[in-house]
């Protein structure tokens, strides 16, 4: 997708790989100045080499650290476009019929909550101060289909993504109701299963055996760019392999999800 983002300053979290890396390349091609962040500094170095662009700056950022966000904005901000993409899964998926929450390590649980929820809230707080001052901006948050339907194999991941979708919908309403008119939009990207590091390799094999088409990071990045262009406040963009992008409607999405994922019959 080709849109003109010259004169836009963007921040991307989770940019060292997957969706974040792919959308960073798209943003640069569209003319944006980009600050790409991650905790994976080796991955950021590879991104820098691949992009070979003066419009790209990389910086280590723990998205779950509010003080790190404050320092980043002071050093590299402000931004009128934020792609809040960083996230992790528990990778504590148990056999079908077992209870995945049993035995989940507390430290891993805190890591998932910090990246998936705190990172979105702290990131939004950090960029919104400038956006509200100017009255303009766009925030794109990576959620998941797991934020729209039950995900029996990983309920904690589902918890975080449901929280993200609820946050996006609620903040969109708050922006619409703001006392002063604001041209600020927030939307959620809700991918299905993707061929990225967040999905274990054995899960990829099992899903493909069931006929599920895994998404590429580039396909999801294209949807992010569409969301930036269309600026539909509160939208939840569903991206599913083999299907056109849709704004969320349960009766359209539910038949696509394997029953072992939702736990429903």
Image (spheres, rainbow, N blue to C red):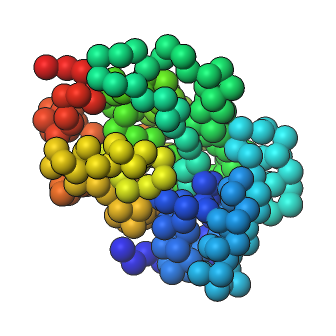
Residue 176 location (% of width, % of height): 49, 37
User: Would residue 127 appear left or right of 247 to someone viewing this image?
Assistant: right
Q: Quadrant of residue 75?
A: bottom right
The quadrant of the picture occupied by the C terminus is top left
Q: Position of residue 105 (x, y in %)?
A: 62, 22
Quarter of the image that includes the N terminus: bottom left
Seen in the picture, residue 210 relative to 135 is either above or below; the reply is: above
Asked if residue 168 lies left or right of residue 135, the reply is left
Q: Residue 225's spot in the image, x, y percent?
A: 42, 64
Residue located at (17% from left, 40% from top): 256
Position of 84 relative to 78 (above/below): above
Residue 244 is drawn in which quadrant?
bottom left
At horizontal 78% and vertical 47% (from top left) the residue drawn is 69
How many discs mark residues in the rendered view?
0
Question: Which residue occupies 18% across, 48% down?
Answer: 209
Residue nearest the viewer, comparing 202 with 123: 202
**Pick the front one: 133 or 97:** 97
Is there any visible trace of residue 232 in the rendered image?
A: no
Q: Is residue 70 something that shows in the picture?
A: yes
Tell me which residue sits at (39%, 32%) in the image: 147
In this rendering, is residue 77 above or below 182?
below
x and y percent of residue 29 in the render? 51, 81
């Amino acid at each position: 997708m080709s849109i003109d983002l010259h004169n836009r300053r963007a921040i991307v979290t989770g940019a060292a790989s997957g969706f974040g890396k792919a959308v960073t390349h798209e943003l640069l091609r569209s003319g944006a100045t980009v600050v790409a962040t991650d905790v994976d500094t080796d991955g950021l170095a590879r991104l820098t080499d691949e992009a070979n662009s003066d419009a790209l700056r990389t910086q280590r950022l723990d998205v779950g650290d509010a003080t790190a966000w404050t320092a980043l904005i002071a050093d590299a901000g402000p931004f009128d476009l934020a792609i809040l993409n960083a996230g992790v899964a528990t990778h504590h998926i148990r056999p079908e019929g077992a209870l995945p929450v049993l035995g989940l390590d507390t430290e891993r649980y805190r890591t998932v909550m910090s990246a998936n929820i705190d990172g979105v809230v702290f990131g939004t707080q950090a960029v919104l101060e400038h956006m509200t001052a100017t009255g303009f901006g766009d925030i794109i948050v990576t959620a998941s289909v797991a934020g729209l339907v039950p995900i029996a194999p990983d309920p904690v991941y589902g918890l975080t993504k449901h929280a993200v979708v609820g946050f996006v919908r609620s903040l969109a309403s708050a922006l619409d109701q703001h006392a002063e008119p604001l041209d600020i939009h927030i939307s959620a990207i809700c991918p299905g299963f993707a061929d990225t590091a967040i999905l274990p390799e054995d899960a990829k094999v099992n899903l493909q055996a069931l006929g599920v088409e895994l998404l590429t990071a580039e396909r999801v990045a294209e949807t992010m760019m569409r969301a930036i262009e269309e600026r539909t406040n509160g939208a939840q963009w569903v991206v599913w392999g083999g299907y056109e992008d849709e704004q969320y409607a349960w009766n359209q999405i539910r038949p696509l999800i394997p029953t072992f994922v939702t736990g429903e019959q």
